[in-house]
Image: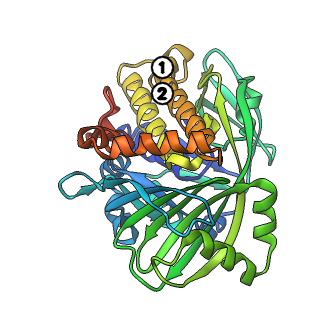
Amino acid sequence: MLDMLIVGGGYVGLSVAVATKQAAPHLSVEVIEAAPESVWQKDERASAIIAAATRMLEVLGVWDEILPHSQPITSMIVTDSRTSDPVRPVFLTFDGEVEEGRPFAHMVPNVEMVRALRGACERLGITIRHGVSATGFAAGPHSANLTLSNGEVLETKLVVACDGVRSKLRDMAGIKTVRWDYGQSGIVTTVEHERPHNGCAEEHFLPSGPFAILPLIGNRSSLVWTERTGDADRLVASDDLIFEEELQRRFGHKLGAITVMGGRKAFPLGLTLSRAFVAPRLALAGDAAHGIHPISGQGLNLGFKDVAALAETIVEADRLGLDIGAVHILERYQSWRRFDTFRMGVTTDVLNRLFSNNIAPIRIARDFGLGVVERLPKLKSYFIGEAAGTKAKNSPRLLMGDTI
């Protein structure tokens, strides 16, 4: 019988495996990944990793491998305008450091993050099974059986579901969700531009949704471009000339002419919150537990916070000789993470509704609010600390840069 099975071999699933195995080497841990082994190498996206998460990756021994490929976000500006406006006034600016030498976030190519975490799994002796998925889950008093698509049945003390926002394991366990669709899609692509970004991230609030420009190494930026779903689908399907022309209108000319690099994809946006994060012999982490709007750039970082809390819960229970899959043990993890997740879900929902419109009185009110924050340095410092994860009370040890 295995101690822990993780379903989902993305960065959250791999991080749970590494964090747990590193702190408790005697535990047997395996990862189940439905995609073929080479798929992760084709991911062209990049993610914003907050300071607290980089602390955890340092403890896991992978950050030094990731850092040469990452771009520090040294500053951020927020604007609120329409596409047709000739001038985009800056309403809010942030300095990018939460402490000396540590920016509040880095932009990291997904492929480099997964590569480093897979390397750590290999060093720790964690098996990753590719090309099989979970088709059945049955929890018993002392163990759970996980049925795989190849017919194999694995017995384990605990299953961790990291299988995405449409988690099959969550459904198998009977965990309900609160969910709604925003009618928006996020277009993700990478561009090259003439002039350097100097590590500055930009968030343009446009009537159809936020348009985020996130700096990458070199004269490149990752874009998360929110549009109404029908418009997003048409833009992604359009020819390169039309797509780049529409993109340049939103991007502006501050960094000169731009060229799209690689592919472009649109992802439907919605809010999904699980009513429970745990069930007997099962814990949800990452998008399986929550899917939020990318307006705050916190989706992946919520998953890393799950990793830190879940690994600490499991390891401490094991050190006390307790059953790591018992629901009363897992409830500590749930109580640790559920409120923070609910708060972030509500915050992103309100921000998206507040800024994704062109109603004049609302625009005046929100721009006044941004202006007030800009003039209060202590309040700005608080917000940046919250975004970086360095101001949270009762944080898991890994997020504080400590070993479990």
Residue 166, how many percent across, how many down? 73, 41
Toward which corner of the image does residue 352 lie, by quadrant? top right
Residue matched to label 1: 335
Q: Residue at x 78, y 61 (%)?
A: 231
Q: Residue at x 60, y 18 (%)?
A: 142
Q: Residue at x 42, y 54 (%)?
A: 49
Give the left or right position of residue 59, taking residue 110 as reference: left
- Where, quadrant-wise, is the C terminus in this rendering? top left
Tell me the element at label 2.
Answer: helix
Percent x, y of residue 259:
59, 83
Helix, strand or loop status at disc 1: helix
Residue 151 at x, y percent in the picture? 81, 43
Question: Which amino acid does the dot numbered 1 rest on?
Answer: Ser
Q: Quadrant of the N terminus?
A: top right
- Where residue 71 sits in the image (x, y, percent)? 38, 67
Residue at position x 39%, y 31% from top? 312
